Amino acid sequence: MLVLSRKVNEKIKIDEHIEITVVSIAGDVVKIGIEAPKDVRILRSEVYEEISRQNREAAENIKGKASSGTLDELRKKMIE
Amino acid sequence: MERQLKMNFPLGIPGFEAYKDWIFIPEDEAPLAQLICMENEYIGFVLARPETYFPKYLEDLELDVESRKVLEIKDDTKIEVWAILCLADDIKQTTINLKAPIIINLENQKGYQIILNEEKYSSRELLFVQQDQTSAEERGKE
């Protein structure tokens, strides 16, 4: 990993179109500003990881349950 | 007849990034669908139409430039919005992932699981809670 030291208000440029600014530092919280084209996906990493975990759990859960009638029961409840 | 559509997820699905091709099988009677991985039929999801239980959900939903680009969506493109269900033994405990809905472009058969930045909806909303609240309200009026 490339590690750079930056002070408040100093920036890092990535490629042509992305610029990252250290907006403020307070205790162990760093506020970061990101300027990037609108078609670049920017997410807190833990949010993406949570969705991945959630997806794996959902996929895991239908294996047994789809056959054991849970899905039929759900379908019935949704139609009524 | 049951529809079966081959869908391409250009970025895969979080947790399953390697799999880009999926079969999408919407049901006629219930607002349910299945999404099955083409390369591994043991990987699949049950999806539901979120507006069935969360009527305001679609109003709140705004597609950003990035997802429009991935899905090649223009202003008049026909899309569908689905959300992944997490089944439980007790169906009342079924949860729906409203934080990361699956958007489908029916015209080019591309799909993308977007992740909303706002905190309004969680990835584990109880599916039947709202309905039960509504029926409780209706009972209260009687």
Image: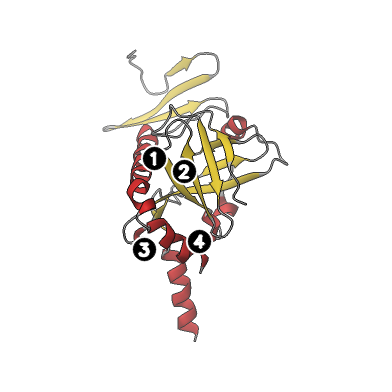
B80 and B63: which is toward the camera: B80
Q: Which residue is mark 1?
A: A51
Which element carries disc 2, helix, strand or loop?
A: loop
> How many neighbours does mark 4 have within 10 angstroms: few (below 14), some (14-19), or many (20 or more)?
some
Q: Which mark is residue B53?
A: 4
Which is nearer the N-term, disc 4 or disc 2?
A: 4
Which element carries disc 4, helix, strand or loop?
A: loop
Q: Residue at x 47, y 67 (%)?
A: B131
> How many neighbours does mark 1 have within 10 angstroms: few (below 14), some (14-19), or many (20 or more)?
many
Residue B109 position in % (x across, y down):
62, 36
B137, above or below B58, in the image: below
Q: How many marks?
A: 4
Q: Which mark is residue B100?
A: 2
Which element carries disc 3, helix, strand or loop?
A: helix
Amino acid beneath label 3:
Lys
Q: Chain of mark 1?
A: A
Q: Residue at x 27, y 32 (%)?
A: A28
Left or right side of B90 for A36: right
Q: Which mark is residue B92?
A: 3
Q: Chain of mark 2?
A: B
